[in-house]
């Protein structure tokens, strides 16, 4: 198994971060990495369009595995069939204090094509996670200014 794990501190309460993270309809307005259609309901599928630098947008239809309000969103998707290239994506939130939240954003990969595919897109994927994290931080912190 291989994984990509990123982390960022957001100067906003955990509920603010969660609300913006879960508002998939607004992703096209701020999120440079992923656009999501659907609802984060365990057992349902989302439609995720991933934007990696230097690549065509790719669409995946992962299944939501876990939703814990203000704490965790996890889904799992695969390329073509399970076992080739599977990814378990997660967003984990932790309150540092009332006004700061730690976001841990990552994905665990497995399958027979993991090594090959991550050689091709691993760096771009990690950069996409980081760009999304920074954009989310900006959205959350700007939301507080607007209040």
Image (cartoon, helix red, strand yellow):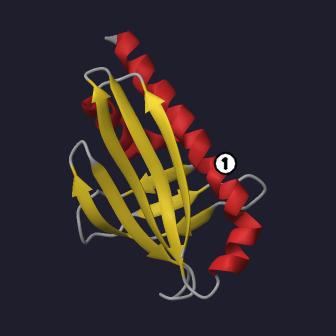
Would you call the spot at circle 1 few (<14 residues within 10 Å), some (14-19), or many (20 or more)?
A: some
Residue 56: x %, y % from top left: 71, 62
Residue 86: x and y in percent read: 51, 78
Q: Residue at x 44, y 54 (%)?
A: 36
Q: Quadrant of the C terminus?
A: top left
What residue did someone put label 1 on? 127
Q: Secondary structure at mark 1?
A: helix
Residue 49 found in image quarter: bottom right
Q: On screen, 143 above or below 24?
A: above
Judging depth in this view, the residue of 72 and 64 nearest the camera is 72
Residue 30 visible, this orientation: no
Q: Is residue 87 above or below residue 15?
A: below
Q: Nearer the viewer, residue 146 or 101?
A: 101
Nearer the observer, 107 or 18: 107
* Residue 42 appears in the picture as rendered: yes
Number of callouts: 1
Quarter occupied by residue 88: bottom left
Q: Residue at x 63, y 78 (%)?
A: 114
- In the rendered image, residue 107, in percent from the top left (x then y), is placed at 49, 62
- Residue at horizontal 75 percent and vertical 70 percent from the top: 119
Please state if 47 lies on the left or on the right of 70 as rendered: right
117 over 140 or under it: above or below? below
Query: Which residue is most to the right?
Result: 54
- Compared across the picture, whether 78 is left or right of 39 comes to right
Residue shown at 71% from the left, 64% from the top:
121
- Residue 44 image point, x, y percent: 28, 69
């Amino acid at each position: 198994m291989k994984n990509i794990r990123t982390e960022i501190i957001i100067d906003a309460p955990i509920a603010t971060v969660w609300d913006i993270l879960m508002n998939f309809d607004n992703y096209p307005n701020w999120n440079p990495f992923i656009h999501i259609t659907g609802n984060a309901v365990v057992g349902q599928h989302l439609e995720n369009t991933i934007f990696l630098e230097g690549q065509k947008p790719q669409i995946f239809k992962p299944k939501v595995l876990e939703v814990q309000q203000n704490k965790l969103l996890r889904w799992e998707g695969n390329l073509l069939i399970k076992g080739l290239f599977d990814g378990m994506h997660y967003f984990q939130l932790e309150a540092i204090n009332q006004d700061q939240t730690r976001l841990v954003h990552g994905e665990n990969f497995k399958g027979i094509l993991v090594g090959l595919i991550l050689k091709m897109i691993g760096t771009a994927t990690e950069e996409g996670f980081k760009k999304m994290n920074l954009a989310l931080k900006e959205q959350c912190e700007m939301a507080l200014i607007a209040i």
